[in-house]
Amino acid sequence: MRLPGLRSIHINQKGFTFVELMIAFAITGIIAAAATGAIFQLFSSSTRSNNQIMAVRQVQNAGYWISRDAQMAQGIVTPIAPEFLRVNWTDWDGTQYAVTYSIVSGKLQRSETRTVGGIPQPTTDSFVAEYINAAGSSCQYVANVLSVTIKSEVGGGSQQSSETRLYEVRPRPSA
């Protein structure tokens, strides 16, 4: 038993034409391409921003430690590579400090040696900053002012970010 109205629906229904299907696929393709481009741009700019933040942070860490030690210094030497900077001072309690900075494989290494009561203590080594460009970093000690330029480069290719800062530090006056 068939319903008379059902047969007329089947006969009059023709479906989509080839042109309509091609237009629908083209519109879907354009939307998909735009979405893919937007997502790629989002990830690309996010990586670039993260690299820039990392570069700034590494330069700030290097500047903090070098400034801290240079302000305490009674003697400053800007040696030739692989050493970057050498400072020394005697604390209020007679403890003698000698701190050496070196750039080793893109990392700024701080080596501290203390002498307490004439007895040398073990040297403490620590990395204070990464991604440091040795060729773009320098230090000079002229007219009682230590000028330190630190350059950090993070990432590669189109994602590379770099940051360069100049720190000028005056050591404490000699006693």
Image: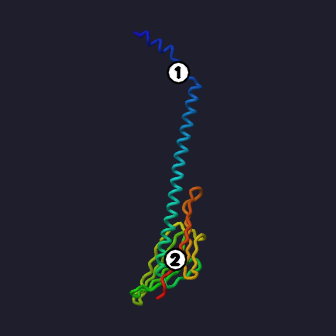
Q: Amino acid at mark 1?
A: Gly
Which residue bears the numbered disc 2? Answer: 169
The quarter of the rendered structure image containing the N terminus is top left
Identify which residue is drawn at 48% across, 85% down.
Answer: 173
To which quarter of the image does residue 78 belong? bottom right
Sequence-earlier tag: 2 or 1: 1
Q: Secondary structure at mark 2?
A: strand
Identify which residue is drawn at 50% across, 13% down.
Answer: 11
**Is 40 placed above or below 81 here?**
above
**Is 74 placed above or below 160 here?**
below
Nearest to the eye among marks 2 and 1: give it: 2
Residue 145: x %, y % from top left = 55, 79
Q: Residues within 10 Å of mark 1 (few under 14, many from 20)?
A: few
Identify which residue is drawn at 53% across, 18% down.
Answer: 14
Residue 55: x %, y % from top left = 52, 63
- Comparing 160 with 164, the one in front is 164
**Is 111 placed above or below 157 here?**
below
To which quarter of the image does residue 17 belong? top right
**Is 55 placed above or below 108 here?**
above
Res. 15 mark: 1
Q: Secondary structure at mark 1?
A: loop
**Colour mapping:** rainbow
Residue 124: x %, y % from top left = 44, 78
- Is residue 160 rendered to the left or right of residue 113? right
